[in-house]
Amino acid sequence: MKNPLFTAGRLLILIISAFSFVLSSCASAPGNYQRIIRNAYSGAASTDKLNGELIKRAMTAGALASTADYRIGPGDLLEISVFQVDELKTTARVSRAGEIDLPLINGVKAVGLTTAGLASAIELKLGVYLENPVVTVFVKQYRSQRITVLGAVKSPQVFTVSGQKYLLDMLSMAGGLSGDASNLCIVQKKGSACGKPEIIKIDLKKLLVDGRADLNIPLSSGDVVSVPEAGRFFVDGAVGGPGSFQLKGSTTLTQAISMAKGLNFEAIKKIKIYRDAGDGRRRLIVANYDSILDGKSPDIYIRDKDVIFVPRSELKALLKGIRGTVFTSSVAVGREGY
């Protein structure tokens, strides 16, 4: 059995060596966020779940789809009949001006109306000649429509389609979402000749995961569907899993730290956020993590290209090293004295 004084002396030498190492490391700068930026786009988060939901929702929506919401457009061929008046049954092609001509009445505006809406309009005009006419309108041949799908989809392009198409239809035709897709979809509806295009923002998570059928909006010729790429933020320093992460939806600082597997023992709770100022420089934000957890300070929403750095306490690191050294030495002494 070795002398206990020899073992204690060896432990003291280890502690002094560890302390010297800490002092030398203090002279070096803490983590360098530029290193993470260089590796920013490694390991993109998967969108398999959203694509799986897209396939299921698109199949369900396709089975339930009807022409009730379809808006008649130039070039459509319509079949029109009047109940118990076979002489008025006819087919009519919608002109470029958006009108149709029928027996007894000419210049009926059709473009932009549903089949039910056009039937009501025809009934009103025929009411001059017939008592309570009942009109049925059927789209016999749809015109070709061009709908554009852009952004973070697998096959972005301009699609030539016919019939009523919905958002889920077009996302499916574009091959689904790519790996860097955000949870947002922007639909630009073609405006009238005088009006501005209407911009509609759709939360894809609510549409696909939560099953919000009202968000599966109908599309028409000239509409543009765009899926932006997800932003990215970066976490470095005293965390369990530093790296780059996709920014999908609203992400707070506490959520970002959780995604990086939490704080290490030696972490300092004054966390630094380097934010892109838009002019090539970065603005520094210092957040008190304990104050946020205690509800004394509001959580901070993370933005695209944010770099989160968690400083490391050298004293905590030293204590952690000493604790590990003491434990190892104790085990060694126990074995030697066995």
Image (cartoon, rainbow, N blue to C red):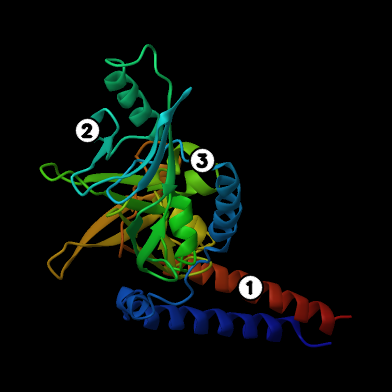
Q: Tell which residue pokes out farthest to the top in this image.
A: 131
Q: Quadrant of the C terminus?
A: bottom right
Q: Secondary structure at mark 3?
A: loop
158 vs 239, left or right, is left
145 vs 86, left or right, is left
Q: Secondary structure at mark 2?
A: strand
Q: Quadrant of the N terminus?
A: bottom right
Q: Please, what is the three-letter code of the amino acid marked with disc 3?
A: Ser
| Residue identified by numbered label 2 | 106
Depth check: 181 or 198 in front? 198
Q: Please, what is the three-letter code of the amino acid marked with disc 1?
A: Gly
Depth check: 154 or 30 in front? 154
Q: Please, what is the three-letter code of the amino acid marked with disc 2?
A: Asn
Q: Which mark is residue 324?
A: 1
Q: How many marks?
A: 3
Residue 260: x percent and y percent? 49, 63
Residue 298, can we see it? yes
Mark 3 and mark 1: Cα distance apart in space: 69 Å
Depth check: 197 or 19 in front? 197
215 vs 97, left or right, is right
**Discs 2/1, front:** 2
Residue at point 34% right, 15% down?
A: 130
Vertical comparison of 71 with 286: above or below: above
Q: Which mark is residue 66?
A: 3
Q: Quadrant of residue 82?
A: top left
Please rate how many residues cluster around mark 1, counting C-alpha atoms within 10 Å: few if below 14, some from 14 to 19, many from 20.
few
Mark 3 and mark 2: Cα distance apart in space: 29 Å
